[in-house]
Amino acid sequence: MREDAAAESDLAKAGYRDRLLTELAQNAADAAARGGLEGSLWVDVDGRTLTVANSGRPLDESGVHALTALRASNKVDADEGVTGRFGVGFSAVLSVSDEVELRSSAGSIRFSASQTLREIDSRELPVPETGVPVLRLVWPSGELPSDGADSEVVLTLRPDVDAAALLSQMTREAVDLLLELPALGSIRLGEKTFRRSERVLDSGLVEVVIGDRTWWQYSAPNARWLVPVRDGVVEPVADDVLRAPTRSDEELSIPAIIIADIAMQPDRRRLMPAAPIAPLAEGYAKFLAALPPRQRTALVPIPAFARSETDSLLREALLKELQENEWLPVVGEPDRAPQRASVVPGLSDDLAELLTDIIGGLVVPELSGPKHERALAAVSTHRIGLARIAELLSGLEREPKWWNRLYSALEPLVIDTLAVEELGTLPVPLSDGRTVTGPRTVVVGVELGEDAPSVQWTRLVHPVAAHPLLSRLGAQTASATDLLSDPALRALIEDAADQDDSVATELAQVVLGLAAHVAPGALPSWIGEVLLPDSEGELRSADQLLLPGAPLASVLVEDSPFGIVDADFVQRVGEQALRVVGVGWGFTVVREELPSGPDHDLDAEDAWWDTLDEDPEYIEAVRDLDLVDEDRWPQALSLLVESPATRALLTDRRGYTAWWLRSNAELSGGVLGLLRAPGDRTFEGLLDAAEHPDAGFFSGLLASDTVDDPELAQLLLDRLADPLRMPASAVVARTHRLLGEAAQRRVLDLEELHLPPFVRGLSGDLVDPGDALVLDRPWLGAALPAQRVVLGSFETADALADLLDVATASTSVHGRVSSTGVVTTWANEPQAVLGFAALGREVPGGEVVIHHELSVELTGAVEATVTVPWWVDSDGVHHVMRTWTLPQGM
């Protein structure tokens, strides 16, 4: 009696303290299993009475013995699908009640603490210290279960039990119990009913639905596995416990719910010591294999801190099961064990298709992203990085288009400098048919088209394989212009002259194939050395050939060294490509960056080079100008204007082309450099206008608005002395000013100039140099005869006087103020103040002498007394007439 009381107390307060519904549900599930039907359980509270009813096989005699013999059990047939093993779970009722009635269609019994106490007292037995054993003595009951129930437990709740809270707690347990006890189909708690339904899916999984929640279930040899599902997507479990079959206290962190067949301690809270855990993992790989491929890794236990020893052992067993068994989807094959599979992080469908016959067991793209990385690592899936891919591709022979697809598929994976380094040995197919290692060693053609020719002088990527990724990996880019400007090609062209004609012909075909993608004038001049067939069947340099019908031929001298390109060859390769490599149509332009000297086979190039202040960084010049027939310059100039490449050079005065044409090309019997543009008024009346329909493009060929060479200076001096020329006074003064500036800059060698017999005065008259005076002081202008005055610039008057060999006015004529005036200051004279204000100038300090009439007595080259408006005497004092407000020059 004392032992039973103690055992009941321990079980009610410890082992089964919170398992009332769980234990009664297990009994209901066992009854349903024995009865071979779907079980139902329903719970009602009426005041202080709790009723738990179920369907299934009713209580029999052996069951009564089990309930009264605390450590006995009538659940001995494991094949019947029953849950309990110890026959002690019913003691959970003692956690809420001391008055228990078990009603069954086969007979009813009752347990009562109060009646047991009276029986003890009637026999004068001592009452155990732990209380009366409620389940030791049984009394018959005449009550039957409610309609529809085969068994019914009626509990009178103790006063300390909150009936509403108890029912609420049971409601929270209902869903778990329906998952754990498949023999139960429904549980009703008061007004709320939970039903379980199952459906076998095509995958072999069982879909379990309870209310609005869904699970997928898989039955393995030693456990059932479940995972919550929402909208067809599994939702891994974060924290749970081992269920055997109902919840225990063994905490787990695995991503799926496990309902295990494993030995538990009598209170079903802990595993039996040494209970084998590893067998529980058997079949877990098949569970994952039944899931949609992209969801499988979600149920891989990711390494983490275990929540219990059981958790640690089960995790280890599950990972071993997953590592060694086939469940991981791979490309083009049945599922593989992860240990025999490889994952390429970030694998796309395109890359998978390209690599599947190179890398076996390649994990499908759906599982190759960052989301799945930790799971695949946990099951020992081999990781293949970009460097390994490059290594595996080494020596592979594929068509260029295949390589282009590969580069496209790899490009999204190249996200940083490390990825660039890893692909440093990626194979690259070349235009010549070879496949080389390393993008850094190749050149990617730009806009060459897929029919670009094979290039011999550089590692040109096959145009079909070319892809922007190669540039990101270090490949250089090159346009057709870049390829045809490569010094290595120049060496090949030079060598071809000493080899068989077939070598030169093959090289020419490659060059012309690339030249089709280049604009005329974009290549260095040495490209013209490529050998091409002429009309006589001989090979000649391209720059020594003209196209049939070339307009250049019509302006050249009869014995020019040019040949004509073979007409059939022109038909095959096209005129455009031939013109690009230097075959003539119009004039050819020579180009070179950083020229080392005047070595471009240009006429008088040395003389032009000497005119430069420093070596040019770039030379661009029209060649063969010296071969133009002197009678055909009008046509030749039109031809130069017609081509944009040559037209641009006509405006560069310092360039070779304009320099040569100014001195050698003629129009109407005069060289261009001594003619003026029709709209240029600088030397109007002295220089003739260039008469040509394209003269508007000749700005660099004609005389400029400065005097910068001795030939122009000589012509201007001669024209100033020509009595048939009638230039305006302003033109005469401007021309003298420009000549004086040129003399002062020392661009003219006075010893080489031939002075004419006359000079032109300001009035337009021709005057003997001995009588002429270069005006070098502004106040002398009003005092001297205009026909004798040579006006230029006061700043360069001395240089002009030296150039013309004419005296300056201030050294030849002297003046003395002979009239009397009033001494004052500029600031005191209203008219002076107004005059300076009109000019926007400050009123100067100093004295000024005001005369009613200012008379100056001249001596020297001019002997006369003259009236002038302004004079500055030898002391620097200004004299003005009262009627004159402001001297010019002030």
Image (tube, rainbow, N blue to C red):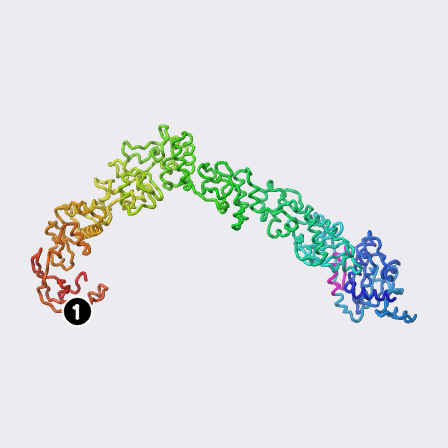
Q: Which residues are magenta?
A: 168-190
From the image, tell me which residue sits under label 1: 825
Quarter of the image where the C terminus is located: bottom left
Give the percent coordinates (x, y) of residue 365. 60, 47
The answer to whether 728 appears left or right of 574 in the picture is: left
SS category of the residue bearing label 1: strand
Count residues near mark 1 (Cα–Cα under 10 Å), then give few for <14, some for 14-19, many for 20+. some
Quarter of the image where the N terminus is located: bottom right
In this orientation, which residue lies closer to the viewer: 587 or 87?
Answer: 87
Relative to residue 145, is residue 765 depicted above or below?
Answer: above
The residue that appears at 45% across and 40% down in the rendered structure is 448
Was residue 176 drawn as part of the magenta stretch in this picture?
yes
Which kind of residue does numbered mark 1 sit on?
A: Thr
Was residue 463 drawn as part of the magenta stretch in this picture?
no
Q: Is residue 350 visible?
A: no
The answer to whether 815 appears left or right of 15 in the picture is: left
The answer to whether 466 appears left or right of 558 in the picture is: right
Residue at the far top in the pictured view: 536
In this orientation, which residue lies closer to the viewer: 682 or 117?
Answer: 117
Q: Which quarter of the picture shows residue 502?
A: top left
Q: Which quarter of the picture shows residue 457?
A: top left
